[in-house]
Structures are given as structure tokens and as C-alpha cells.
Amino acid sequence: VLLILNDKTSIDVSKYFLTDQSTESQLRCSSLLNPIEFLISSSFISFELPEHVQQMVSYQLNISFHFQTYSSDAIILYGINKFNEDFLGLDLIDGFFYITINMNKKKQRQELFQQRLNDGQTHFIHLHVQGYQGGLEFNITMNYRQNNRIVIRDSLSKIQ
């Protein structure tokens, strides 16, 4: 897990909150005692996806975080594979929360919640990605109650 600051500086924070049982294939994080604050508007969280996203049969990824902002446009989280081909992004566009998924050089973007989240309030996001034979399923929950499900089947890379 990287913190990207000012588009130039990156800090690997994985070692600060990985448990002793962690392995390369099973990354587990424990609770952070102190929240990470981004004081520079061009900062975001980055992580590396598996080499070939479309081959993620039985793959699971769970990411949960709180955020609070007045910014209308922001990259919140960005994951990319080591070939810089497939990526997953969570961002704010005009205050609305979007997911962007790029698989097989086909990019899909979808607004997730019908409300602006740049209100200065604390919002909780939970992202669950499940790989299965023939596709990926994304479940995104906001503030423990609003839920969106996105399914991408085969190599067609269409949000359904």
C-alpha cells in the first residue's frame, strides 16, 4: 500500500500495519491507531493489483476506509497491475463518487451513489472484489447502508 504525495513522492506504509501472519499472496492489515491525513490535495492511496485481473479466479480483495473532504474532484484510491494495463480507481467527480475499471484496455466508469460526498462529513466506504470463473464482481457499500453491485463478465469488460 502506497501513499502518493504531490504526484512525485510515494511512501510504502504496508510495513506499518501488516500483521505478522501476512504473506505476499495474503495481505492482511490491522486497524490503524491514527488516521492518515492528506494535507496535500494531490495525494491518494495506491496499491498493486494482480498481474492479470481477468484471471483472478477465486481472488478476493477487501478495502475499507473513511474519508472526509470538501474537494469536488479527487482521486481517492488507485490500483494498477505491474504492466500498467488493468486498473481500478475510486474518485470524486463534481462531488459524486465514481468507480473506474479498466480491463483489457476497455475503460468503464460508473457513478455509485446519487449524492455529493464533498460535504465535509465523514463517509465510510467498503469495497469487496470477488473473482470467479468468467468475471469479477464489485460490491461497494457507503456508510454501512447504501450498496452497489457491479459485475464484469469474461473479457467483454462491460459493467452490467
Image (cartoon, helix red, strand yellow):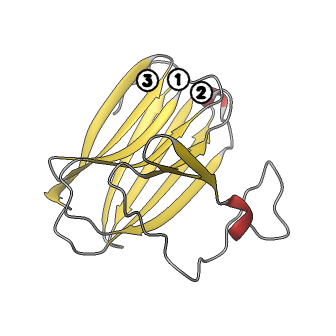
Report how far apart the C-alphas of labels 1 and 3 lie in the structure: 7 Å
Contact (CB < 8 A) between labels 1 and 3? no
Report how far apart the C-alphas of labels 3 and 2 lie in the structure: 9 Å
User: Is 52 drawn above or below residue 122 in the view shown?
Assistant: above
Contact (CB < 8 A) between labels 1 and 2? yes
User: Is 15 drawn above or below residue 95 in the view shown?
Assistant: below
Q: Give the residue displayed 42% in from the left and 33% down from the top.
A: 101
Crowd around label 1: few <14 · some 14–19 · many ≥20 (10 Å): some
Kind of residue at badge 2:
Gln
Q: Secondary structure at mark 2?
A: helix
Q: Quadrant of residue 68?
A: bottom left
Kind of residue at badge 3:
Ser
Quarter of the rendering occupied by the C terminus: top left
Q: Nearer the viewer, residue 43 or 107?
A: 43
Q: Which mark is residue 157?
A: 3
Q: Which residue is mark 1?
A: 154
- Residue 1 visible to the viewer: no
Q: Give the residue displayed 45% in from the left and 32% down from the top.
A: 152
Q: Give the residue displayed 60% in from the left and 40% down from the top.
A: 131
Q: Quadrant of residue 28?
A: bottom right
Kind of residue at badge 1:
Asp
Crowd around label 3: few <14 · some 14–19 · many ≥20 (10 Å): many
Q: Which residue is mark 2?
A: 54
Ranked by sequence position, the earlier of labels 1 and 2 is: 2
- Residue 148 visible to the viewer: yes
